[in-house]
Amino acid sequence: MVTRGLQVMMVFHSEDPSWKIVHRHMQTAFPLVDGQNLSRSSGSRDVMDINLTEVVELTRQLIRIDTSNPPGNEAPAMRHLGAYLSQWGIDVEYVEVEPGRPNLFARLRGAGNSGHLAFSGHMDVVPPGNVPWDHDPFAADLVGTRIVGRGATDMKGGVAAMAVALTTLARAGFRPAADVILAVSVGEEVLGPGARHMVATRALAGSRYLVVGEPTALNVCIAQKGATRWNVTAHGVAAHASTPHLGASAVRYAAKAVLALEACPYPFTPHALLGEPTVTITNLQSASAFNVVPDICTFTAVVRTVPGMDPVELDRWTRTVLTDLAQETGGRIRAETEFRAGIPAVETQPDHPLVAAVVGAVTAATTRTPASRSLSAVLAILR
Ligand SMILES: [Zn+2]
């Protein structure tokens, strides 16, 4: 995809302290410097000319450094990227997240102390798997107009495009009104320790926008569902299967709970892009002899939320549903509920100037107008 000089990007719009997310594509977001908050303070439009060959070669170089996660081993690739950036005078900082696993921050200094534009990517890739590849996944072969290799799209191509964007600005002597930052994280494919570290340390404080170079098939994505889940353990009363009335089946309780939760008892307003929330029950397990009323059953309830749904409020609803069902058993069933991953849904308004700027950038680069889509919609396209 990088051979077209384009990367799909997701954009976060921050209104500190909470982040709002916009996902989108764009070439490099350079038109943003003409925008409301990153007005051009020096330089010329020539800075928008990106050297495509440079993007392709940097992408291939990064692919050839195996950063399969686990374990990640991002450091050599981070150092390679850092060396490329610093040769053009860009400030590069490595921040160790775990031993031998540094996040990278590159910063083109602007005139102001806030309103920064941050580009975000991750350096790790998912392992190539056991299915044989037609090409060595770490050779980065050029096949026609495509680069074939693990991470070409997700997302060393994106990282390379953003890095070349930064150096192109630097080489042109461009000084933006606010900083342009490239933040590359470790471990995105497994639990995201790099991104979590950035949030915990407020590493991108002062940034107003975050453009993420994840693949979205060149669609501009401005909203994403949230993720909330609960691990539930139901404790019942064991009994011989010939006398079930003496027991309290944890499986029967779980079956009722599954249906009650999948009916989505939560209040919500359908979202224009994301539609309705979904509830999915996963990991349902029990263990008992074939002739014993099961006294334990565990499952996970996963709710993908739309904007306006508060994870804490959802937790209250979930517990109410589970408690009410337990009470129907006369207290013979007890449910333990563990609340996990309360990540809220996020969105940026489609008429936001940044959205218009990015859509304009994609249009200019692709001669087509990308639709604003949710990430879910994009994933549907990719399938
Ligand atoms: Zn990715």
Image (spheres, helix red, strand yellow):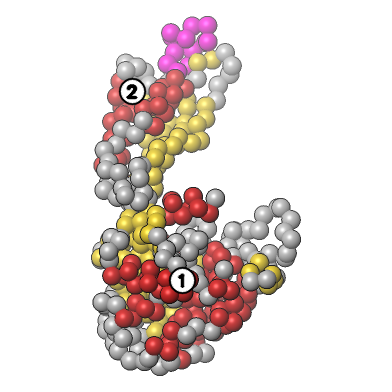
User: Viewed as shown, does residue 275 lie left or right of 4?
Assistant: left
User: Dividing the picture into quarters, in which one does residue 331 lie?
Assistant: top left
| Mark number displayed over residue 367 | 1
The kind of secondary structure element at disc 2 is helix
**Nearest to viewer (mark 2 / mark 1):** 1
Q: Is residue 366 visible?
A: yes
Q: What whole-number distance in Å separates the C-alpha atoms at marks 2 and 1?
A: 56 Å
Residue at coordinates 31% horizontally, 33% vertically from top-left? 265
Residue at coordinates 50% horizontally, 61% vertically from top-left? 217
Q: What span is in magenta?
A: 238-249
Quick one: label 2 or label 1, which is nearer the N terminus? 2
User: Dividing the picture into quarters, in which one does residue 106 lie?
Assistant: bottom left
> Residue 274, position in %: x, y?
36, 49
Is the CB–ligand 1 distance for label 2 below 8 Å?
A: no
Total marks placed: 2
Within-10-Å neighbours for mark 2: few <14, some 14–19, many 20+: many
User: Viewed as shown, does residue 272 lie left or right of 27?
Assistant: left
Residue type, label 2: Leu
Q: Are marks 2 and 1 in contact (CB under 8 Å)?
A: no
> Residue 314, position in %: x, y?
29, 40
> Residue 19, position in %: x, y?
31, 62
| Mark number displayed over residue 273 | none
Within-10-Å neighbours for mark 1: few <14, some 14–19, many 20+: few
The kind of secondary structure element at disc 1 is loop
> Residue 99, position in %: x, y?
53, 68
Q: 2 or 91, which lies in front?
A: 2
Provide the residue designation for mark 2. Answer: 325
Q: Is residue 201 visible?
A: no
